[in-house]
Amino acid sequence: MKGPLGLAWRYVLFHKAKSLILVACIVLTTILPVAVKLLVWQFDQKIVARAASTPSVVGARGSSLDLVLSALYFKQGAIEPVSYAEVERARGDGLATAIPLHCMFTAMDYPVVGTSLEYFDYRDLGVGAGTLFVSLGDCVVGHKVAEMLSVNVGDQLISDRANVLDLAGQSPLKLNVVGVLEASRTPDDWAVFVDLKTAWVIQGLGHGHQDLNKESPDSPVLIASDSGRIIANRGVVSYIEINDENVDSFHFHGDTEEFPVTAVLVSANGFKEETILQGRYESGESEVQFVRPEIVVRDLMTIVFQVNRFFNANAILIGGSTAMLLVLVVLLSLRLRKREMETMFRLGCSRGAIVWLQVGEMGIIFGLAMVFVLLGSTWVWSVSGDIVESLIVNSR
Amino acid sequence: MIQIENLKFQYPRAEFMLRLPRLVVESGQRVAIVGPSGCGKTTLLNLISGITLPLEGTVQVCGEEVSAMSDASRRNFRIAKIGMVFQQFELVEYLDVLSNILLPFSINSTLPGSSGIRCRAIEFAEAMGLKEKLTRRPAQLSQGEQQRVAICRALIAEPRVVLADEPTGNLDPENKRRILDLIFQLAEKQNQTLIVVTHDMGILSGFDRVVDFEKMRFSKADEKSSGSIGSAVGGQA
């Protein structure tokens, strides 16, 4: 490389440390706002896409955002459950498809979502291996759960205790992995799906135990049997695993219509049907609310973008101060190199060429910085989906 | 030939004014300009090379009036006709020896760069005893070696005039003589006019003429007509 640009390149190469520091300053100052911008954009795309694919949600009154986060991202503990009767109510005599969601427990720290088979069609989730759940105790794991826990069809997952300090509480249930979902890059990848009844078993609303009619004389557990009411002592064996041998012993106590669900996904058959349904929920003093996730999420994103504006202003200020520091560095460098420039002038270099030499050096520094910014931005872009997903998943 | 007539020069906001009634240096002469610090020796070299322009008077180098040229023409003239050697060597720290020698070609598009120039630079370096150090940086060289690189750089474009400002000022006695001999040899080989500014009276042997600049710049108008530097400064080494 000849001429001022060649000299500039050799100067940059010779002063590697100084050049790298300058490049790093520019890269860091530029890439942080770019990365945040990309992440916010990705967050917006993902969260809005998920919300847009969920026409409406019914759940307990309270925070509509918590309800949406529970229904879309399986966030636990934020809302009160509603009764299963609400699922039938949401169907509204054929006005809509209603899918129950029960999200109160975890297995290996991943949310256990009790639902119906309709959910998989609703979310367009394909099975990568195995099948969907067919009987009580079966579970289908999301793609990421299978990857993170290294589980596959035929393995078992144990539900987590709701309260590890409550020794008398419900025992964990061994779930049989019968299927692994294809990757969907949605929160469904990070969940364990079971039939709603299995979720109620995990909650302790249903259970299975040894047949009290076939009591062993060696270990009597029956205390009383009176007019169809059977009372057993604490020695009765409750099953913590559901299999072909004991599945028939599982039963529920109470009316399943009163059993809890955390949310109901509602997909009305049309705009008119949706309006009728909404009207039903909004009239009177209903205990439940009917929300459109897209509207709730867009409200949330408005706040996010407002916060982002503050961040942008901050980035501009930092960028400005970095630019001023860079100018200072360049000016000091020019001062230090005054003799060098003067020598070049004496040897016949024009003032214009000397300016080009300086511009070339800064151009190379900026060029290198921009290459790194581009590479970094591409990398952030490639992982932003995963970052946003994990941010959403970890926040639940 | 270099011919200076009725020269007046003053730096902005400075009391000192350089006045030089007449100075003539014949082609191929080796001239030493001596005088105390601050008497204007370096300024004279800048005026000859066209780096600075006189307030009054004329400076003719190789038959061309330097002060009448445009900036670009003066620069091109300086590139083509004048080679400069400095007291502090003024090598570029981030270039190796060979690149420093070739610097005039790197920074001037008017000088045609070619593989022949590179060969000449290597020949110069070999003649200066720098063959093994072509890839070294200035900081890796001794002061004598650095000045030899600077001399190669000044002569690579085969200028007609070589201006050296205190070329031995930073050298030890042994290197002083060696460097001067090298400058003389190369200048003689290429029939170059050599003007060396120095205040070191110990190196004056070997010059065709010695100009006492302090005396010369205060010479009377009638002395101007004498025309030769010998008469103006009255000294020959």
Image (tube, coloured by chain):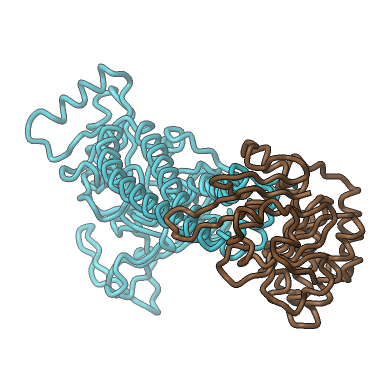
Q: Nearer the viewer, residue B135 or A166?
A: B135
Q: Residue at x 61, y 67 (%)?
A: B214
Q: Position of residue A206 (x, y in %)?
A: 32, 56
Q: How many marks?
A: 0
Q: Nearer the viewer, residue A154 or A72?
A: A72
Quadrant of residue B176 within the rendered picture: bottom right
In the current view of this chain or complex, which residue is farthest to the front? B222
Q: Residue at x 44, y 35 (%)?
A: A123
**Chain drawn in cyan:** A
Q: Is residue B14 visible?
A: yes
Quadrant of residue A47 within the rendered picture: top left
The reply, left or right, for residue B180 in relation to residue B38 is: right
Q: Nearer the viewer, residue A151 or B226?
A: B226
Q: Locate the C terminus of chain A by quadrant.
A: bottom left
Quadrant of residue A231 within the rendered picture: bottom left
Q: Position of residue A241 (x, y in %)?
A: 45, 62
The reply, left or right, for residue B100 in relation to residue B130 is: left
**Chain drawn in brown:** B
Work out whether A230 lies above or below A391. Answer: below
The reply, left or right, for residue B153 in relation to residue A341 is: right
In the current view of this chain or complex, which residue is farthest to the bottom? B173
Work out whether B85 lies above or below B78. Answer: below
Q: Position of residue A33 (x, y in %)?
A: 41, 48
Q: Is residue A179 visible?
A: no
Q: Position of residue A132 (x, y in %)?
A: 51, 43
Work out whether A181 lies above or below A233. Answer: above
The reply, left or right, for residue A2 in relation to residue B130 is: left
In the current view of this chain or complex, which residue is farthest to the top? A272
